[in-house]
Amino acid sequence: MPESEQESAPSGIDTSKPSVARVYDYMLGGKDNYEVDRQVAAAALKIAPDAPQAAMANREFLRRTVRYLAGEAGLRQFLDIGSGLPTQGNVHEVAQSVRPGAHVVYVDHDPIVLAHGRALLAVDETTTIVDADAREAEKVMDDPRTRALIDFSEPVGLLLFGILHHLRDEDDPKGVAARYISRLAPGSHVVISHFHNPGPALPEVSEQATTAERLFNEHLGTGRWRTREEILAYFEGLELLEPGLVPLPEWRPETGDHQAVPGITYHTFVGGVARKP
Ligand SMILES: C[S@@+](CC[C@H](N)C(=O)[O-])C[C@H]1O[C@@H](n2cnc3c(N)ncnc32)[C@H](O)[C@@H]1O
């Protein structure tokens, strides 16, 4: 690691170990990453050269779904779990472009997100950032910073972009999602994007997903490419909206989106939106 990187890093940031938030930031073309993160990214790019496209597809999915939630679905408050580093088109910017004054609570456990998020995500009295472990659903929802902006008796947009696949099987990601969902008022919406292993239906893609999973776990200690059934199970008890659980570029595409080439990552990153009846 170049010495100057540790010196210039915000305090509390360990640049000797890679972090999910910083590797993802690199894939999106961001600047808040270090040599150790770029090494993991380089290894991932060898397995999936189109990984930056997948990251971009995820952000475009975020933009389209949050606009839908703040617009047609009429939501005014959002809980963004595993929000990541500030980037172009942050949730509050997208939501407030449709519904001025919409409230957004960002939640992440990585100190780099908090270091940069305090300035760029917690911008005024409509947004805040909570440093917490996503697995502690009750603690997140009962946090005074969350309660100051979110009224759980009114519909909420629960945003789970690229986070549940960073919870290990033993963390019971379905149970974690269910604990958040159980607190939501009717009319709330849940958005999930998730790494996907298509299994025998697409053997080549499936093999790639397995290799990527191994790499992620070796270097980042996390990352599960789950089956379609496992991902659909998160939406249990909710009404999955059209077009269902699909590769991210297929969720209500709009002109102006990046042209998605159906490469390897096209089928290994899927998402959907559901409504709580
Ligand atoms: C791939 S990024 C996704 C960022 C953003 N949601 C998006 O989809 O563009 C995953 C984020 O989840 C955070 N994360 C992972 N495990 C977490 C946990 N147990 N609690 C809180 N945040 C977590 C990471 O720090 C990272 O910022």
Image (spheres, rainbow, N blue to C red):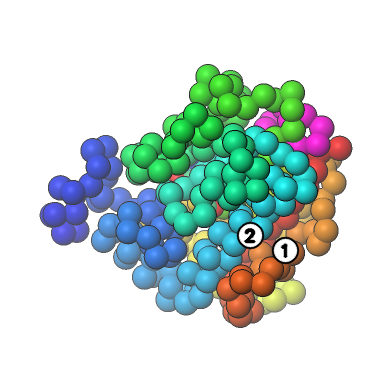
State left or right for residue 6 relative to residue 234.
Answer: left
Q: With respect to residue 106, does 258 lie above or below?
A: below
Question: Which percent across, then down, holds residue 258?
Answer: 58, 73
Residue range highlighted in magenta = 179-188
The three-letter amino acid code for the residue at tag 2 is: Phe
Along the viewing direction, whichever of 258 and 165 lies nearer the viewer: 258
Q: State yes or no: Cβ of the residue under disc 2 lies below 8 Å from any atom of ligand 1.
A: no
Q: With respect to residue 94, does 58 lie above or below?
A: below
Which residue position is annotated with label 2?
61
Q: Residues within 10 Å of mark 2 (few under 14, many from 20)?
A: many
Q: Residue 195 lies in what quarter of the image?
A: bottom right
User: Mark 1: which secondary structure?
Assistant: loop
Q: Residues within 10 Å of mark 1 (few under 14, many from 20)?
A: many
Residue 181 seen in the figure:
no
Along the viewing direction, whichever of 271 and 213 lies nearer the viewer: 271
Query: In terms of sequence position, does the residue under pointer 1 or pointer 2 come before the other?
Result: 2
Residue farthest toward the front in the current orientation of the protein: 100
Q: Quadrant of the C terminus?
A: top right
Q: Is residue 186 found inside the magenta-colored segment of the image?
A: yes
Q: Is residue 122 found inside the magenta-colored segment of the image?
A: no
Question: Which percent across, then down, holds residue 158?
Answer: 66, 40
What residue is at 71 percent from the left and 39 percent from the top?
75
- Kindly identify which numbered label has been placed on residue 251: 1
Q: Quadrant of the N terminus?
A: bottom left
Image marks 1 and 2: residues in contact by CB distance under 8 Å: yes
What residue is at 14 percent from the left and 54 percent from the top?
4
State left or right for residue 49 relative to residue 96.
Answer: left
